Amino acid sequence: MIKKVTVNTLQKIKDSGEHFSMLTAYDYSTAKYIDEAGVDMILVGDSLAMVILGYDATYKIGMEEMTIFTKAVARGVNRAMVVADMPFMSYHIDVPSAVTNACNLIKCGANAVKIEGYSDHIVEVVKRCSESGVPVIAHLGFTPQFLNSLGGYTIQGKSADATYAILEQAKALQNAGAFIILLEMVPEESAKYITENLKVPTISCGAGRYCTGQVIVSDDMLGKYSDFKPKFVRRYADLKSVIYDAAKRYDEDVKSGAFPSDDEVYKQEELRQLYVNS
């Protein structure tokens, strides 16, 4: 029997000084393969707005789209924890609607949700979600949904004071019930300090080597999304070239008549009768 990754599993990894892995997935088959490979957490990230739907920013995706992709991913996963991003404006207006949206993602098959940013309102959302049985990952540092407010893709926590500020935010979110703090685009020394001063695990998204877990976008890791490559991404494959080469050979075979071959077509069993009747 496959043992499901849970909140307790991840906390034990933190307490033992070990590490866990996280990748994004947006469809059934990719989620299935990532799960079978042993990755511990699968994030249905709002990054799908860019790498799947072609938007120029993550904040342009909504709840309806997130529920569709969360359902698809959840169907392919047996072991990994499935985490769904709470999209822009799904938790900002009021606490009741935020909790409702979080619960709907759980109903879609997610085991937890991720919420970006920090404010008194967001702390209350995390608290109410946690009280409602929805595990929450809090996302600090660079928060893409706040891209316009941050003024671009900028590293966060570069100074000591900025690091202390992120730590205080993380502690408040931890105390509200967040079971993981994700740190994005934070200097690794800052992330190490924050990790050492929290009870819950941390996940690095470009925050260095000292967090409990690591996450990158699978389409970046696989070399499938090539519009840009973040500094902190390591490419383990070149699917862009694989897809391009396969499509080009297919196109050439179709136009030359080489595809389909005799082995790739169905045969009429009453061919003679077919022409007699005509």
Image: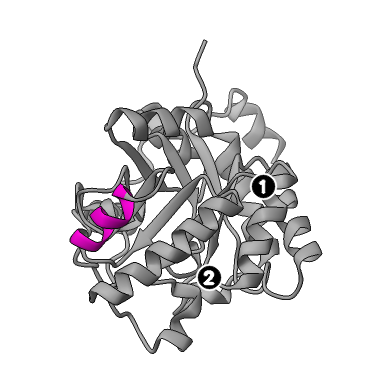
At 44% across and 80% down in the image, what residue appears? 56
- The kind of residue tagged 1 is Ser
Can residue 9 be seen by looking at this rendering?
yes
**Cα distance, mark 1 to mark 2?**
16 Å
User: Circle 1 sits on which residue?
Assistant: 130
Residue range in magenta is 189-196
Mark 2 burial class by Cα count in 10 Å: few <14, some 14-19, many 20+? some
Q: Earlier in the sequence, mark 1 or mark 2?
A: 2
Query: Could you tell me which residue is drawn at 32 percent across and 75 percent down?
Result: 162
Question: Could you tell whether 40 is left or right of 3 in the image?
Answer: left
Where does the image place residue 58, in percent across and percent down from the top left? 49, 72
The prevailing secondary structure element of the residues shown in magenta is helix
Quarter-of-image position of residue 14? top left
Q: Can you identify the residue that label 2 sits on?
A: 118
Who is closer to the viewer here, 243 or 110? Answer: 110
From the viewer's perspective, is residue 17 above or below residue 248?
above
Q: Residues within 10 Å of mark 1 (few under 14, many from 20)?
A: some
Q: Position of residue 80 (x, y in %)?
A: 47, 32
Amino acid at dot 2? Tyr
- Tell me the quadrant of the picture where the C terminus can be found: top right
